[in-house]
Image (cartoon, rainbow, N blue to C red):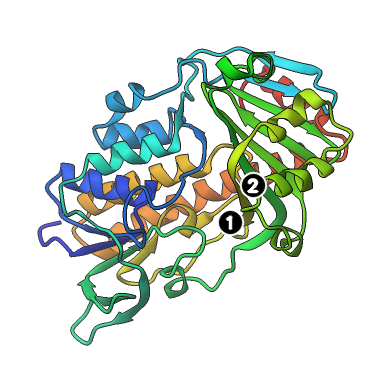
Amino acid sequence: MPTRPTIAIVGAGLSGLVLARVLQQHGVGSTVYESDASPAARTQGGWLDIHDDSGQAALRAAGLLEEFHRHVHPQGEATRVADKTGTILLAEEGGADGGRPEIDRAALRGLLIASLDPGRIAWGHRLTEVRPRAGGGRELAFADGTTAVADLVVGADGTWSRVRPLLSAAPAGYTGVTIFDLHVRDAARRYPELSELVGTGALFALSDEKGLLTHGCDDISVGATLKVSEEWTAGVDWTDTAAAKEVLLAQYADWDPALTDLIRLGEAPIVPRPVHALPVGHRWDRVPGATLLGDAAHVMTPFAGEGANQALFDGAELARALLEHDDLDAALDAYEEPMFARSGVVAEMSAQGMAMCLHPDAPRPLLEAFQGLGAGRS
């Protein structure tokens, strides 16, 4: 663009950080406004498999692919499927060259943050309102009383985006599923039998419309996955780790103790993560000077490993559109229309993945899906 717009990116998640980084690589400024006070303000979740045709393509555009590969887990692409008896029904031992290497989410976010110029991220800026300006553009108001102005406001602020209402009234609805995060620390040394059961990559232990979804490494990340109401989750004090474990263990009472050790040996904190999703195929009519990235645009269930990849790709694709088009509206059209089509497909895949994992006859549907893909990764 001959005349560069001022760009405000709301949210320092993966999508917003990639957008800022790619623009920076081409000499285009932006400011990322993040509500957290610092990068370490809260936990970032577990492991991500980063796909070669989306997430890795975005990191390549950002000039960070080589750095990314220095942080991946070499055996992270291995996949195992088991039932509640602990019987391993499928085992694919993968290396780091299968197109979807694994990286810790915090490490990935950290390398993106480190790649930005000092001052590019304004920490501690919780957005409260976006309003139009008489002279054009928009004004952003923050909880601390400060304001900022921008020609383009990009909502990269996740499931509960404060920018989304500018473009869409669609709600991110609760899917009826909550994932309870735990971690078994230093598992290979302290609990070698448990570490051997899980393996070096993903284990899907599924039965009775529930699951224990894990990722093995020096630490084992565990997602106890249940169909429960939001009221049920709210009725448990998850900060009381011992009591909360008993609540979870009661849900898996007839599962093999080798599997329920994943809960029993998990360390605090236990973090409930209710799974929300926008309607599959979510889109909006063109709104001048505003758009959305990542979960703000298309939050989906995590059962196809696509959310982070689509977020990264969104950021790189919006940056490319802004760099290639002189007109801001033309740039947003060039970004949004392909994004709507792409995200609709993967959101449907993710919904189907959740249905397979939590099927009454699980893990049979997942096994059949893997076999149909040549026992590859989902």
Q: CA distance from mark 1 to mark 2?
A: 8 Å
Please give left or right for residue 328 compared with residue 338 in the image. left
Residue bearing mark 1: 281
Looking at the rendered structure, which numbered label has been put on residue 260? Answer: none
Q: How many marks?
A: 2
Q: Is residue 159 visible?
A: yes
Tell me which amino acid carries mark 2.
Glu
Q: Taking 66 as reference, is 346 above or below it? A: below
Quadrant assignment, res 352: top right
Q: Taking 329 as reference, is 93 above or below it? A: above
Q: Are marks 1 and 2 in contact (CB under 8 Å)?
A: yes
Q: Position of residue 44 (x, y in %)?
A: 46, 45
Counting residues from the start of the chain, the first of labels 1 and 2 encountered is: 1
Q: Taking 95 as reference, is 58 above or below it? A: below
Circle 2 crowding by C-alpha within 10 Å: few under 14, some 14–19, many from 20: some
Residue bearing mark 2: 348
Name the foreground residue: 323 vs 255.
Answer: 255
Mark 2 element type = helix
Name the foreground residue: 272 vs 114.
Answer: 272
Q: Residue at x 27, y 76 (%)?
A: 138
Mark 1 element type = loop
Q: Residue at x 85, y 31 (%)?
A: 255
Quadrant assignment, res 21: top left
Q: Taking 310 as reference, is 172 above or below it? A: below
Quadrant assignment, res 59: top left
Report the quarter where the N terminus lies. bottom left
Q: Is residue 366 visible?
A: no
Q: Residue at x 63, y 35 (%)?
A: 266
Tell me which amino acid carries mark 1.
Gly
